[in-house]
Amino acid sequence: MRTVRLLCALVLACTACSAPTDDSTCTAGFTCTTLHVPLDRQRSDGPSLDLAVIAADNVDAPRGVLLLLTGGPGQPGVSLLPSLRHNVHPDVLRDYRLVMFDQRGTGPNGINCPSLQETVGGSDFLTPPAAAVDECAQRVGSGLGHYGTPDTVDDIEQLRQSLKVDRLTLDGTSYGSFTAAQYGLKYPDHVQSLVLDSVVPHKGFDPTGVDLMASTGAILTAACHQDAACTTDPVADLAWLVQHGVSGTDLMESLSVASLNSVNPSLKGIPAALHAARTGDDTRLKELIQQTTSKGLTYDTLSAGLHIATLCSDLRFPWSGKPDRKTALDDAVRRLDPKRLYPYDVATSRSQLMIQGCLRWPAARVSTYPAAQKLLPRTLILHGSNDLFCPLDWSRWEQTHSRDAKLVVVPGSGHSVQRDARGQEAVREFLLD
């Protein structure tokens, strides 16, 4: 769930809680500052974090502040602004003051776990080595339990106060949509509008991956129907490969990354690679797995440490609240319906990063969410029909749990819809209405 390196080929008023930085490296037309936030908001005298902020210089923009939230979790904001601002329509940039920031644990000052970073990069799926997970938890140390989305939500509220504005328009992509929605639930009176792109539902999701696996077949079938050269059954081929020793988590990783709008959202060529591998020529499939991956990302591009720290706090696992994690996981896995996992399997579900990583992650403070379950702000939801990170059902759920939400499904588009001109136009119409 993120914009990876392939995607990237790819002023704040000074207050007691923000300070200017050296603008010699700041993007022209923007001012860079630092927001000082407490690691633990229950301890005002405890350690603090310095979060980099970048804000457009059009302080008097007629429609106020537009806060772009990156995803992962683990992506920074400031270093991605030069590329991501091109995903925003010029008319929107004219009428809004664009702001981004490095969410806690991200960017150059973020969590750096070298072994975990090397082995899984920014992946949601690749199986993490146990030793790398343990080492990362030790590095995070006293910060365990303070890198959940509710912590970031309160950082955003502090940022809003620092900006001296009453309301924000928030635009979050992928896991950034989850963060934006959580802010909207907790601080609805301070939200003007929400744009939720490639939605992670604010209720959370099942870390066993059942929703994503269940949606894969329909997406591959539809992509095949759009490609005259596709004459095979990619779903059956994928299932056969999983059943005959090809790593399901490797396949999930590469197919999902391929569905990014910066990579190959049409999924062209993938059915042919799957079929060739099934019939004995795995050259193209090996190339896909080796090259189409978020493995290799550096920590300041997408922090693997922050990624696991946030997910292990935010999500509810089969072992949540139970003393014996492995037994609870075994019980949950036995209850999985293989038909819902197809074309993947139970072994794939169990091997994913979120399961194996969080199974070993130390118990710490668990994210708590607002009691409100319905989003009140005016909301636009964007979904690309070929997105293999976030199923359409998640966007539909989000719409039904919002008071005033419009869902736009862009045919043939992939993950991160605002990289698609049709997605940009939908946002322009919504924000300038």
Image: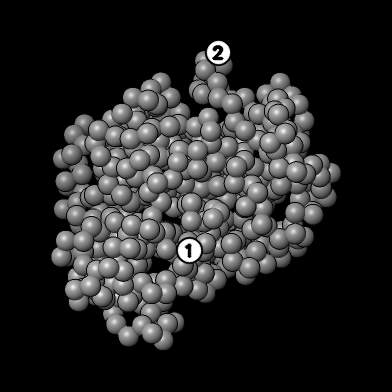
Mark 2 or mark 1, whichever is nearer to me: 1
Q: Which one is in front, 179 or 30? A: 30
Question: Residue at horizontal 75%, vertical 59%?
Answer: 90
Across and down, in percent, residue 30 comes to 74, 41
Is 346 on the left or on the right of 97, as rendered?
A: left
Left or right of residue 424, residue 131 in this image: left
The three-letter amino acid code for the residue at tag 1 is Val
List x then y, in percent, for residue 176.
53, 48
Residue visible at 58% across and 33% down?
Answer: 154
Q: Is residue 215 above or below residue 318?
A: below
Q: Which residue, given by chain and number where applicable, does mark 2 sit on?
A: 45
* Mark 2 surroundings within 10 Å by alpha-carbon count, few (fewer than 14), some (14 through 19), many (20 or more): few
Residue nearer the viewer, 382 or 82: 82
Q: Furthest residue to the top?
A: 45
| Quarter-of-image position of residue 223 | bottom left
- Residue at x 42%, y 71% (from the top left corner): 267
Helix, strand or loop at label 1? It is loop
Q: Earlier in the sequence, mark 2 or mark 1?
A: 2
The disc at residue 263 is: 1
Q: Which residue is located at x 23 percent, y 50 percent?
A: 350
Tell me the amino acid under the disc marked 2: Asp
Distance from disc 2 to disc 1, alpha carbons, whole Å, reads 46 Å
**14 lies above or below 294:** above
User: Considering the image in quadrants, where does the C terminus appear?
Assistant: bottom right
Q: Can residue 176 be spotted in the picture?
A: yes
Question: In the rendered view, does 85 fall on the left or right side of 205?
Answer: right
Residue 252 seen from this side: no
Horizontal and vertical percent position of residue 414: 49, 66
